[in-house]
C-alpha cells in the first residue's frame, strides 16, 4: 500500500451512511481503492475543518493523484463564502489540476429513500449533467458490490503512476506466511551489517535450489527485512531463466527494465548490452541499492546487471548453482525440516492444530516442499467441511505415497493436480487455455479473448485462480503464473484440448492484441492511414479514449505484444506479423528503441511482400523511413520513403502518398533541399485538402511553416504554424499542439520576440511533460536555452542546454545532440572559454558530417570561425566563413547567411579592411531586414557603424549605431550596453537619447 498513489474520494454525507454505515457506498469505494493497492483519502476527514475550507479542500485534492466521485441525488453542503458544494468544488479542483477523474453515478430508481434525494433537484441535476458532459470515465451503480467492482476495475484500467519519477521499490509484497530459513536470513543480514560497518561494500548472495523450494520467498523476505538499509532503490527483476515457453530474459532487456524502473525514459535507452550496463552502473553510483535478480539462468545473464556500487546488495535466485560467480556467497536451499514444514501448514490453516500427527504425515506427503505445502493448504482452507483424513485421502488418490521417491516434479504435480481437480470444469478449461498465452502476464480482457469467455466470467475465473494460488497478481488486475504452474497447465492442455482448440484460443488472443494495439496506435498516431489487415473486434476491450490511455496501454502491454510478434514470426504468420508491428509503430517512433523499430519494420516489409500485401508493404516502408530519419540515416530514410511513395502511387492511395510526402519533405529540409521540401509538402497539402483530412493538413502546414522559417520567411512561417495550431486545437491533439508551439517559439525568437518565445515554449514544455514525451521535452529545453543565451542569461542557458543534451544522448538522437553542442559552444564562447567552445563545436561538426547535414555543418563552421578570429587565427576564420557562406547560399538559409556575413564583416574590419567590412554588413542588413531577422539586422547596423567610424564617416557611424541601439533595446539583449558607451564617446549629445530608446 505504501507504494500506491493517493486517491481522493468525493461524496456527500448520505453516501457514507447508506445502506448501512458499515457497508456503505463510500466504504465500498474505499475498499476498492485499498484492493487496487492505492491510498484512499476520504473528504470526511476534513469537511468540518476550521479556517479556510475552500482553500483547504483544494489543497487536499491537489495532494492526490486520482479523483473518484461517488455521486447520488444530493448536492451536498455549500462551502462557506461560495455558492458551490464541497463535491462540486472538489471536482473543479481536480479538473483544474488535470487529475484523472473517475465518476460513479448512482442509478435512479423509484425506491430510493427520501434521505438520498434533494427535495429541489435543480442543483444536483445540473451537477450530474456537468459530469456527464465532461468527457470523464463514467460508470453507474445500484448496489454496494457493483460500486466496489466498478471502482476497482476503473482504477486498474487507469493504472495511475505512483510518483512520475524513479520506482524506488518494486519488490513483491511481503508474504503473510514465512516459516524457517532462520540460518539463511541471518547469513544475509549479518553480511550486510558487517559490510556497512566496515568498508561499505555489501554482498552478492546467490540462492539456488530445486523448483518450489522457496528461493524467491527467501530473497523477498530478506529484502523486506533490509529495506531501511537501502533507502534509495529496492528493485526486483524476473529473469525468466526457467519460464516455460520463454527464452531467458536477455540481459540487455533486463537492463532496459532496470533503467526504466530507475526513471529512464524508454526512448533514452542506449543500444547494446555494454552501453546499457555502463549506464546502469553509472546511475547506481552513490545510491544504496538492493537488487533482487529472480529466476536466473546463468552467470552470463546476471553479471551485466550487477550495480558495481559500494553500497549494494544483490540477491540472485536460480535453480542452477552459479559456480562461475566467485564473488557471490552461495546459499543452497534444502527442503524444510519436518517441524518448519508443519509450522508453515498450520500458519496457513490454523484449524489443523488439533491433528498434529496428520499434519506431520501431510507435509511428508508434500515432500517438505514449500510450494506443494502452500497449494495443499490453500485447497484445505477453502474446504471447511474436510478433515485432515479427507485431505490425505485426496492426496493418496494421486499416488502421493510415492511422491517423495519420484522427486520434486511429481511432488509439485500432485499438489497442482489436487487444486486443479477441484476446480469446476469451466474453470479447468479456462486455466488450461490461460497457460497458452505467449506473453508473461495477462489482464481480464486478454483472458476473455483467449478463453472465449465473457469479461465478467474472466474476472471471476482470474480472481478464483488467484485465490487458489494458481496465479499471482504482481500488479492490480495483471496476473501471471509460476513457471511450474505454466508447465503443468500446458501439459494438461496438450493432453486434453485438441490442437484445433488450442490454435483457435491463441488466434483469438492474437486477434485481441492486434485489434487493440491498432486502436491504441491510431489514438497516438501523428497520421491517419488507410486500413490494411483487419481482425474481428473482441467482445471485451480496454477503454481507450485518448493519447494518455492509449499510450499507457501500449507501454504496459509492450512485452506481451513483442512476445506475440515473436510467436507469429516463428510460425510465418505473415498477416499477423504485419498487423502487430503496425500496432507498435507510433509507440516505437515516440519512445524507441529506434534500432529495434528498424528491425521490426524491416521484418514487416518482408512479410507483407511474402503475401503480396502491397498496401501494408508501403505503410511499413513509410514507418521504416520515419525511424531512419530519427536515427540520422537521411539517405536510407529518403530511399525507403521514395519506395513507399512509388507503391502508394501505384495503388492510387492518395492518403498514403500525402503522409509519405510529409516525411519526404522533412528529410529534404534536414539535408538543405528547402525547395524540394516545399514542393513535396505542397503536394501533400493539396492531397490532404482533397481528402478533407484535418490532421494531415495540420501536420503538413506545420512542416511548411518550418521550411518557411528555414528560408527566413518569419511572417509566413508564423502564419502557417498558427493555422496548424488551430487545426490541432480543434482536433484536441495535444501532442500536435506541443510540436507547433515549439516551432512558433523558435520563430518568435528569431524575430527577436524573446518574451513571446519564452511563453510559447513554456506552453510546449508543459504539454510535453504532461504527455511524458521526452523527445519533445529535449527539443523544447534546447530552444529555451537558446532564448536564455540570447538575452545574456548564460548560467541558465547552459543549465537548460545540458538538460536537453542529456535527453538527446539517452535516446541516441544524434541530430539533437549536434544542435545542442553547437549552442553550448556559443555559450562557452560568450563566456570567453574559447578552448571549451572549440571542443564542443568540433563535436557538433563531426555529428553533422556523420548525418550529412549540410545546413548544420555550415552553421557550426560559422561559430567555429568566430572562436578562431577571437583567438587571433584570422586565416582559419576566413576559410571557415567562406565555406559556410557557400553552403548557406546553396541551401537557401538567409538568417544564417546574414549571421555569417556579419561575422565576416567583423573579421575584415579586424584585419584592416573597413571598406570590405562596410559592404559585407550592408549585404547582411539587406537580407535580415527583408526577412525580419531583427537581431542580425541590429548587428549589421552596429557593424556598419563601426566600419564607418574606421573610415572617418562619423555621421554615418552615429546614425547606424543609434539604429542598432534602438533594436537592441527593443530586443532586451545585453549588446545595448556597449553600443550606448560607444555612442557616448562618438557624440556625447546622444547618450541620453540612447538611454531613451532612440
Image (spheres, rainbow, N blue to C red):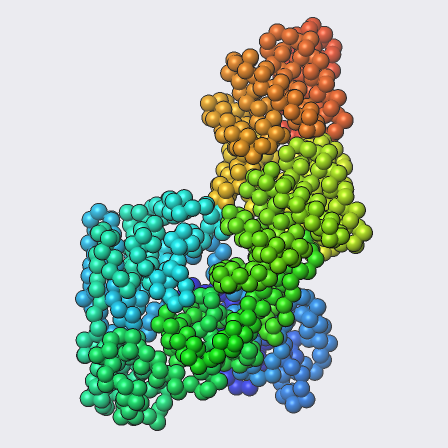
Q: Is residue 573 above or below residue 491?
A: above
Q: Nearer the viewer, residue 593 or 953?
A: 593
Residue found at the far right of this picture:
690
> Residue 79: image x %, image y %?
62, 68
Residue found at the far top of this picture:
952
Q: Is residue 733 visible?
A: no
Residue at 67% from the left image edge and 83% from the top image edge: 108
Q: Determine which quarter of the picture holds residue 976.
A: top right
The quarter of the image holding the C terminus is: top right
Q: Nearer the viewer, residue 108 or 265?
A: 265
Residue at 39% from the left image edge and 80% from the top image edge: 468
Q: Nearer the viewer, residue 857 or 952?
A: 857
Question: Left of 444 or right of it: where is 226?
Answer: left
> Residue 880: image x %, image y %?
58, 19
Q: Is residue 103 above or below residue 425?
A: above
Residue at 65% from the left image edge and 15% from the top image edge: 905
Q: Determine which quarter of the picture holds residue 377.
A: bottom left
Residue at 54% from the left image edge and 83% from the top image edge: 144
Q: Is residue 672 visible?
A: yes
**Callout count:** 0
> Residue 541: image x %, image y %?
59, 71
Q: Determine which quarter of the picture holds residue 937.
A: top right
The quarter of the image holding the N terminus is: bottom left
Q: Is residue 80 above or below residue 269?
A: below
Question: Left of 6 or right of it: where is 732?
Answer: right
Amino acid at each position: 500500500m505504501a507504494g500506491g498513489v493517493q486517491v481522493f474520494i468525493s461524496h456527500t454525507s448520505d453516501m457514507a451512511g447508506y445502506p448501512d454505515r458499515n457497508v456503505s457506498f463510500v466504504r465500498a469505494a474505499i475498499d476498492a481503492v485499498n484492493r487496487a493497492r492505492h491510498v484512499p483519502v476520504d473528504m470526511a476527514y476534513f469537511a468540518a475543518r476550521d479556517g479556510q475550507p475552500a482553500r483547504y479542500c483544494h489543497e487536499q485534492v491537489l495532494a492526490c493523484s486520482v479523483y473518484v466521485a461517488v455521486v447520488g441525488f444530493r448536492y451536498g453542503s455549500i462551502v462557506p463564502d461560495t455558492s458551490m458544494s464541497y463535491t462540486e468544488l472538489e471536482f473543479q479542483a481536480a479538473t483544474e489540476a488535470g487529475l484523472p477523474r473517475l465518476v460513479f453515478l448512482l442509478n435512479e430508481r423509484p425506491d430510493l429513500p427520501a434521505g438520498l434525494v434533494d427535495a429541489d433537484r435543480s442543483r444536483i441535476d445540473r451537477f450530474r449533467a456537468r459530469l456527464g458532459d465532461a468527457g470523464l470515465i463514467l460508470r453507474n451503480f445500484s448496489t454496494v458490490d457493483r460500486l466496489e467492482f466498478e471502482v476497482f476495475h476503473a482504477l486498474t484500467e487507469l493504472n495511475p503512476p505512483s510518483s512520475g519519477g524513479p520506482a524506488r521499490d518494486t519488490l513483491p509484497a511481503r508474504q503473510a506466511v514465512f516459516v524457517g530459513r532462520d540460518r539463511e536470513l541471518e547469513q544475509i543480514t549479518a553480511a550486510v551489517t558487517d559490510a556497512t560497518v566496515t568498508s561499505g561494500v555489501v554482498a552478492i548472495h546467490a540462492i539456488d535450489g530445486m523448483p518450489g523450494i522457496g528461493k524467491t520467498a527467501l530473497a523477498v523476505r530478506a529484502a523486506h527485512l533490509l529495506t531501511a538499509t537501502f533507502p534509495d532503490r529496492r528493485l526486483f527483476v524476473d529473469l525468466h531463466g526457467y519460464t516455460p515457453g520463454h527464452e531467458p530474459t536477455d540481459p540487455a532487456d533486463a537492463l532496459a527494465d532496470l533503467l526504466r524502473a530507475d526513471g529512464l525514459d524508454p526512448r533514452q535507452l542506449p543500444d547494446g548490452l555494454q552501453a546499457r550496463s555502463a549506464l546502469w552502473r553509472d546511475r547506481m553510483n552513490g545510491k544504496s541499492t538492493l537488487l533482487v535478480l529472480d529466476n536466473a539462468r546463468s552467470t552470463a545473464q546476471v553479471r551485466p546487471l550487477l550495480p558495481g556500487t559500494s553500497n549494494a546488495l544483490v540477491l540472485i535466485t536460480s535453480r542452477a548453482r552459479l559456480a562461475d560467480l566467485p564473488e557471490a556467497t552461495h546459499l543452497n536451499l534444502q527442503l524444510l525440516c519436518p517441524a518448519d514444514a508443519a509450522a508453515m501448514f498450520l500458519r496457513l490453516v490454523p484449524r489443523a492444530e488439533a491433528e498434529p500427527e496428520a499434519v506431520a504425515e501431510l507435509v511428508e506427503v508434500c515432500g517438505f516442499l514449500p510450494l506443494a505445502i502452500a497449494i495443499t493448504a490453500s485447497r484445505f482452507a477453502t474446504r471447511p467441511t474436510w478433515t485432515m483424513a479427507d485431505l490425505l485421502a485426496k492426496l493418496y488418490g494421486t499416488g502421493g505415497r510415492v511422491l517423495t521417491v519420484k522427486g520434486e516434479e511429481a511432488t509439485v504435480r500432485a499438489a497442482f493436480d489436487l487444486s486443479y481437480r477441484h476446480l469446476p470444469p469451466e474453470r479447468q478449461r479456462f486455466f488450461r487455455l490461460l497457460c497458452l498465452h505467449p506473453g508473461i502476464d495477462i489482464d481480464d480482457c486478454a483472458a476473455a479473448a483467449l478463453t472465449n469467455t465473457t469479461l465478467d466470467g474472466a474476472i471471476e475465473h482470474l480472481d478464483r485462480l488467484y485465490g487458489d494460488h494458481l496465479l499471482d497478481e504482481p500488479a492490480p488486475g495483471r496476473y501471471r503464473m509460476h513457471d511450474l504452474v505454466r508447465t503443468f497447465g500446458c501439459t494438461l492442455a496438450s493432453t486434453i484440448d485438441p490442437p484445433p482448440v488450442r490454435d483457435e484460443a491463441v488466434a483469438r488472443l492474437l486477434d485481441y492484441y492486434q485489434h487493440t494495439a491498432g486502436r491504441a496506435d491510431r489514438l497516438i498516431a501523428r497520421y491517419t492511414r488507410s486500413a490494411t489487415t483487419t481482425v474481428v473486434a473482441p467482445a471485451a476491450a480496454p477503454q481507450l479514449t485518448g493519447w494518455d490511455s492509449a499510450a499507457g496501454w501500449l507501454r504496459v502491454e509492450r512485452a506481451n505484444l513483442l512476445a506475440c510478434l515473436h510467436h507469429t514470426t516463428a510460425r510465418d504468420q505473415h498477416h499477423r506479423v504485419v498487423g502487430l508491428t503496425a500496432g507498435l509503430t507510433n509507440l516505437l517512433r515516440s519512445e524507441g528503441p529506434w534500432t529495434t523499430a528498424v528491425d521490426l519494420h524491416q521484418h514487416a516489409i518482408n512479410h507483407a511482400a511474402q503475401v503480396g500485401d502491397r498496401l501494408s508493404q508501403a505503410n511499413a516502408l513509410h514507418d521504416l523511413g520515419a525511424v531512419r530519419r530519427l536515427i540520422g540515416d537521411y539517405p536510407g530514410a529518403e530511399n525507403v520513403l521514395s519506395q513507399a511513395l512509388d507503391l502508394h502511387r501505384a495503388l492510387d492511395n492518395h492518403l498514403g502518398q500525402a503522409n509519405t510526402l510529409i516525411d519526404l519533405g522533412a528529410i529534404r529540409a534536414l539535408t538543405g533541399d528547402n525547395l524540394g521540401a516545399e514542393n513535396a509538402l505542397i503536394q501533400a497539402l493539396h492531397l490532404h485538402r482533397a481528402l478533407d483530412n484535418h490532421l494531415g493538413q495540420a501536420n503538413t502546414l506545420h512542416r511548411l511553416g518550418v521550411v518557411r522559417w528555414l528560408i527566413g520567411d518569419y511572417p509566413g512561417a508564423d502564419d502557417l504554424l498558427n493555422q496548424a495550431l488551430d487545426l490541432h486545437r480543434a482536433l484536441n491533439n495535444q501532442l500536435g499542439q506541443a510540436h507547433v508551439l515549439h516551432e512558433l517559439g523558435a520563430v518568435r525568437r528569431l524575430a527577436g520576440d524573446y518574451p513571446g518565445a519564452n511563453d510559447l515554449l513554456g506552453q510546449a514544455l508543459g504539454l510535453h511533460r504532461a504527455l511524458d514525451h521526452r523527445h519533445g521535452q529535449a527539443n523544447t529545453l534546447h530552444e529555451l536555452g537558446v532564448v536564455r543565451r540570447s538575452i545574456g542569461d548564460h548560467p541558465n542557458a547552459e543549465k537548460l542546454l545540458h538538460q536537453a543534451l542529456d535527453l538527446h544522448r539517452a535516446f541516441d538522437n544524434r541530430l539533437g545532440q549536434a544542435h545542442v553542442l553547437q549552442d553550448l559552444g556559443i555559450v562557452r564562447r560568450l563566456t570567453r572559454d574559447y578552448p571549451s567552445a572549440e571542443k564542443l563545436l568540433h563535436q557538433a561538426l563531426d555529428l553533422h558530417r556523420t548525418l550529412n547535414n549540410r545546413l548544420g555543418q555550415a552553421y557550426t563552421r560559422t561559430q567555429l570561425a568566430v572562436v578562431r578570429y577571437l583567438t587571433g587565427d584570422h586565416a582559419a576564420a576566413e576559410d571557415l566563413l567562406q565555406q559556410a557562406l557557400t553552403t548557406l547560399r546553396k541551401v537557401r538559409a538567409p538568417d544564417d547567411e546574414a549571421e555569417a556575413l556579419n561575422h565576416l564583416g567583423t573579421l575584415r574590419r579586424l584585419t584592416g579592411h573597413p571598406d570590405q567590412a562596410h559592404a559585407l554588413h550592408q549585404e547582411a542588413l539587406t537580407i535580415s531586414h527583408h526577412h525580419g531577422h531583427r537581431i542580425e539586422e541590429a548587428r549589421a547596423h552596429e557593424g556598419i557603424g563601426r566600419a564607418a567610424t574606421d573610415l572617418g564617416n562619423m555621421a554615418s557611424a552615429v546614425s547606424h549605431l543609434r539604429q542598432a541601439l534602438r533594436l537592441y533595446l527593443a530586443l532586451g539583449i545585453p549588446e545595448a550596453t556597449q553600443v550606448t558607451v560607444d555612442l557616448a564617446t562618438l557624440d556625447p549629445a546622444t547618450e541620453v537619447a540612447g538611454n531613451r530608446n532612440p
